[in-house]
Image (cartoon, grey):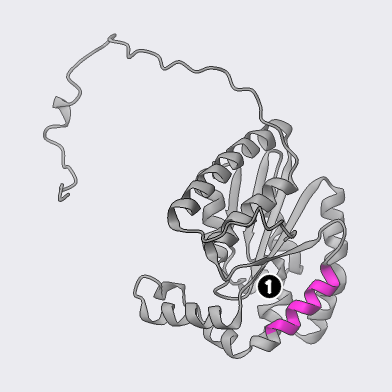
Amino acid sequence: MSKASKADEPKGLGRKRYEKELRKLQSRLCVLQEWIKHKGLRVIIVFEGRDAAGKGGTIKAITERVSPRIFRLVALPAPSDREKSQMYMQRYLPHFPAAGEVVIFDRSWYNRAGVEYVMGFCTKEQHERFLHLCPMVEKFVTDGGIQLIKIWLEVSDQEQKKRFEARITDPLRQWKLSPMDLPSRSHWYKYSRARDMMLDATDTKFAPWHILRSDDKKKARLNCIRHILDAIPHKTLPRESIKLPKRSMKGAYDDQARLKNRKFVREIY
């Protein structure tokens, strides 16, 4: 992530200020959305990072106020036996954007550079081949007119430990614990070395990596949205004035009375 000046950094970011800043940035995302649709842009945003780095919350902050038809989220499950027999990138290609779309990958083809390599789900040769070929594939993608934004969320050892402990004890967070989470904790330095190899091999001019520090979730979300807004040049499009039409009384009837004998949700609150 580009270094912001100290004047730009939110200090003492409480909930009210966070929500105010988030609303401003989400409004700008709506402007960006219209521009992308108008210009027929194609954008891919790749989110990678350590487990418990805050990818889900960051992606939610980006997508909760925009259209899912334009900002599409892709979070693929583990590959099936059939997919394992395919060319490695093959299962990702059908999800690439058409004109006027932004595709957000929550984990991506970079699984091979991270969890697959660290946990032994791919061979050393497959890992080396991926690091060699990945920049070539991404060059082909960007030369084809797709903008590729790659963001790595980095969380500290202490903060990751704190978040994992919260997931273990909090019933509302236990669903976040995956079979890979606890092993990833014990393999901290293996993941660090895998990250470094990935960055060395795939941080290119046409598809650079940007590191997002995410110990402070609120700041990370705001900084991430600002980065995306800055990365895609755009303008505010003029909007036609809208006037709500009056309800027509043609064919009027007591439509609420027709619902009287239907089953309603029990009103508790």
In the picture as drawn, the residue positioned furthest to the left comes out as 261
Which is more toward the observer, 109 or 203? 203
Q: Can residue 240 be seen at all in this image of the molecule?
A: yes
In the picture as drawn, the residue positioned furthest to the front comes out as 7
86 over 262 or under it: above or below: below
Place of residue 153 in the rendered image (x, y in percent of width and height, measured from the top left) = 64, 68
Q: Can residue 120 be seen at all in this image of the molecule?
A: no
Rendered-image quadrant of the N terminus: bottom right
Which stretch appears magenta? 191-202
Q: How many marks?
A: 1
Quadrant in the picture for residue 134:
bottom right
Label 1 packing within 10 angstroms: few (<14), some (14-19), many (20+): some
Place of residue 156 in the rendered image (x, y in percent of width and height, measured from the top left) = 61, 78
SS category of the residue bearing label 1: helix
Q: Is residue 43 left or right of residue 244?
A: right
Quadrant in the picture for residue 194:
bottom right
Quadrant in the picture for residue 197:
bottom right
In the rendered image, residue 260 lying in the magenta stretch gets the answer: no
Place of residue 258 in the rendered image (x, y in percent of width and height, measured from the top left) = 16, 27
Residue type, label 1:
Asn
Which residue position is annotated with label 1? 111
189 over 210 or under it: above or below: below
- Which residue is drawn at the image coordinates 36% and 70% (left, top)? 172
Q: Is residue 185 left or right of residue 202?
A: left
Which is more toward the observer, 75 or 78? 75
In the picture as drawn, the residue positioned furthest to the bottom comes out as 186
Place of residue 208 in the rendered image (x, y in percent of width and height, measured from the top left) = 81, 61
Give the prevailing secondary structure in the magenta stretch.
Answer: helix
- Which residue is drawn at the image coordinates 15% and 37% (left, top)? 262
Q: Is residue 81 left or right of residue 192?
A: left
- Which residue is drawn at the image coordinates 45% and 15% (left, top)? 243
- Which residue is drawn at the image coordinates 66% and 30% (left, top)? 236
